[in-house]
Image (cartoon, helix red, strand yellow):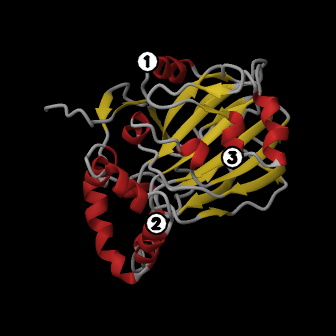
Amino acid sequence: MNQQPHDIHIIDRRSGLRIRETVLGGAMIRLAYRSPLSPLARLLLFRNGFVTRLLGWYADSALSRRRIEPAIRQLGIEMSDFIVPPGGYRSFNEFFIRPLRQGARPFDPAPGAAVSPADCRLLVYEKLRHDTCFLVKGAPFTVQALLGTAPSGEKWAERFHGGVLMIARLCPADYHRFHFPCEGRVAESWKISGRYESVNPLPLACGAEPFARNRREVTILESPQFGAVAYVEVGAFGVGRIRQSYVGPQVAKMEEKGWFEFGGSTVVLVFEPGRLTPSDDLAANSRGGDETLVRAGETIGRAPSA
């Protein structure tokens, strides 16, 4: 198999193999970031929400049902993990936010184990340099920029200087509901308006800044084991809506927090310094610049005393 310069490779945690990721809409991403038309394409596709809203309308409509089976085949989605309603899904978005069957994502119930919030490709930054994350493939960003400039963002950002940051990137093939990585109490939450840049590694390498500029929703979780945890959902191209389904303020580990509607998206977790030791395999892969394919509920780190 010939490797193209725009190929994305990830490490499958369960097999240990380095595999090539199937990218839905790869041609559009290359047009927007690697062509002479890039400035115009990025302006039309990512700098405002019109195209995203249009895609969302289509994905909500019955017309979009025809795209479900081709997507399952192209992306190799294993449907045995999911609940399929009688008569099938009524739209692509209903398929996209499909719920899991009971027990499909087991997890370690020990209080000191933090778990993956989603089915995702995970990158671990073991220690922020002050409040800055230096991306392996992309421009650095600060925790302050991630949390926003509103008073709440400024207040909480100080807690995370020198801490651990994890980027959980979801693709269209993934289960798109997200969960709490640990038990705790929701202390505060807020929304940040912004762009719809892609979170694909190719745009990151071309200078896109989704973690500081895209639309985001921030939740601060106070955990007995891990202290303050910043939980940030990052909307991206095609993600017109981020839905929150939890009630709170007290939440349980692996309780559903919400879901992303159609598109690519990302969850960013930030832990206070000294409160989380990332899993060895995830840390080692990340040092080499590789994302690791993990499932929701898999252990991603532990409290130092656990």
Which dot, 2 or 1, sits closer to the camera? 2
Which dot, 2 or 3, sits closer to the camera? 2
The residue that label 2 is drawn on is 52
Q: Is residue 193 above or below residue 112?
A: below
Residue for point 42% across, 49% down? 171
Observer-nearest of 156 and 180? 156
Q: Residues within 10 Å of mark 1 (few under 14, many from 20)?
A: few
Check the picture and name the quadrant holding the N terminus. top left
Q: CA distance from mark 3 to mark 1?
A: 27 Å
What's the amino acid at mark 3?
Phe
Q: Is residue 95 above or below residue 74?
A: below
Tag shown at residue 288: 1
x then y, percent, for residue 104:
52, 50
Where disc 2 sits, the SS reads: helix
x then y, percent, for residue 102:
57, 56
Q: Residues within 10 Å of mark 2 (few under 14, many from 20)?
A: many
From the viewer's perspective, tell me whether residue 179 is left or right of residue 16. right
Observer-nearest of 19 and 150? 150
The residue that label 3 is drawn on is 180
Where disc 1 sits, the SS reads: loop
Which dot, 3 or 1, sits closer to the camera? 1
Residue for point 39% across, 54% down? 42
What's the amino acid at mark 2?
Thr
Tag shown at residue 68: none
